[in-house]
Image (tube, rainbow, N blue to C red):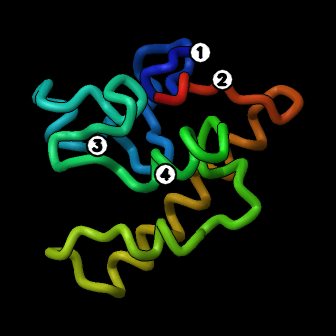
Amino acid sequence: MSRVGFMAEASRSPVISVCGLSCSDCGYYKAGNCAGCYAQHGNLFWGSCPIYRCCVNEKGLGHCGHCPDLPCRTILETRDPSVPLDQHLEGIKARKAALLELVSKDSHGATPRPEPV
């Protein structure tokens, strides 16, 4: 499995970030302006990601789906200010579902972990 997002062997499979966002659906990712949080060690085009720092660097997890606090305060508070609160909360529900699906597919609960920086 690739460490640049949680991408399945087939190239048509979506790339999922630490927090459950689909990099494959992101315009910045598609345009080649962002390689995703794994490849960039949480230092994205918009700044340093507090979710990546918490999950990977501090807790040593492969993604937030392995965290018993999902969704945590960090995820709830890390929000694009242009997105309305209700839409943000709905997005968190979808991301949690995507992450829990990844956990269910992990062999023995182990997910490749990016190297902390």
Give the image location of residue 77, x and y in percent: 40, 75
User: Which element type, helix, strand or loop, lies under badge 3?
Assistant: helix
Identify residue type, mark 4.
Cys
Identify residue type, mark 1.
Met
Mark 1 vs mark 3: give the one in front.
1
Residue that numbered label 2 is attached to: 112
Identify residue type, mark 3.
Asp
Residue that numbered label 4 is attached to: 19
User: Which element type, helix, strand or loop, lies under badge 4?
Assistant: loop
Quote the CA–CA distance across marks 1 and 3: 19 Å
Mark 1 near mark 2, Cβ–Cβ under 8 Å?
Answer: yes
* Image vertical order of residue 81 relative to residue 54, above or below: below
Quote the CA–CA distance across marks 2 and 3: 22 Å
Locate residue 99 relative to residue 69 in the image: left or right.
left
Give the image location of residue 117, x and y in percent: 46, 28
Rendered image: mark on residue 1:
1
User: Which element type, helix, strand or loop, lies under badge 2?
Assistant: loop
Q: Earlier in the sequence, mark 1 or mark 2?
A: 1
Q: Earlier in the sequence, mark 4 or mark 2?
A: 4
Mark 2 vs mark 3: give the one in front.
2
User: Which element type, helix, strand or loop, lies under badge 1?
Assistant: loop
